[in-house]
Amino acid sequence: MAYFFKKDSMEFKPHPRFKGVGFLPLIDKAQDQGLSVSMLEIEPGIEIPIHIHETQADSIYVLSGEGQAFVNGEWQAISEGDYILVPSGEEHGVKNTGNQVLKLFIVHVPPLF
């Protein structure tokens, strides 16, 4: 089955683990066993700490805003249009260092949620 979401029907909720982060799950493992798709809105000054997904690759596209991503052992500047692929088992994190919301489009393979 195909899925289609109109932007006016999508509502960000508070992230269950990170204060100051909006979470919008689009596709989860109930809909597709191969991947999960979500968007994040990270408020200025907020950080998702360095962490690891043992079994999921993390594909991250920056929709808007500015920040830093922890990849390959160091913090690197990110902004609109940047793309990050983090293989499973690799440390990564992200923080908003700008003055507007940092918006990310994320795909986890296999699904994280």
Image (cartoon, helix red, strand yellow):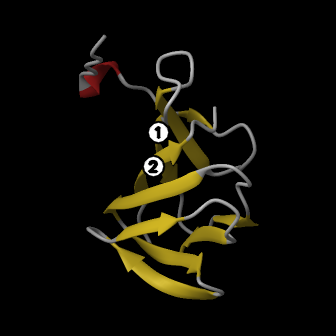
Q: Are marks 2 and 1 in contact (CB under 8 Å)?
A: yes
Count of numbered marks: 2
Please give the name of the residue rendered at 62% of the width and 89% of the height, measured from the top-left corner: 74
Mark 1: secondary structure? strand
Please give the name of the residue rendered at 32% of the width and 62% of the height, measured from the top-left corner: 64
Task: Give the answer, above or below, for where 37 lies relative to 49.
Answer: above
Horizontal side of residue 23 vs 53, given as left or right: left
Q: Is residue 97 visible?
A: no
The residue that mark 1 highlights is: 38
Mark 2: secondary structure? strand
Of the 4 image quadrants, the one containing the C terminus is: top right
Quadrant of res 104? bottom left
- Type of amino acid under label 1: Ser
- Type of amino acid under label 2: Ile
The residue that mark 2 highlights is: 106
Of the 4 image quadrants, the one containing the N terminus is: top left
Relative image position of residue 29 (x, y in whole percent): 56, 24
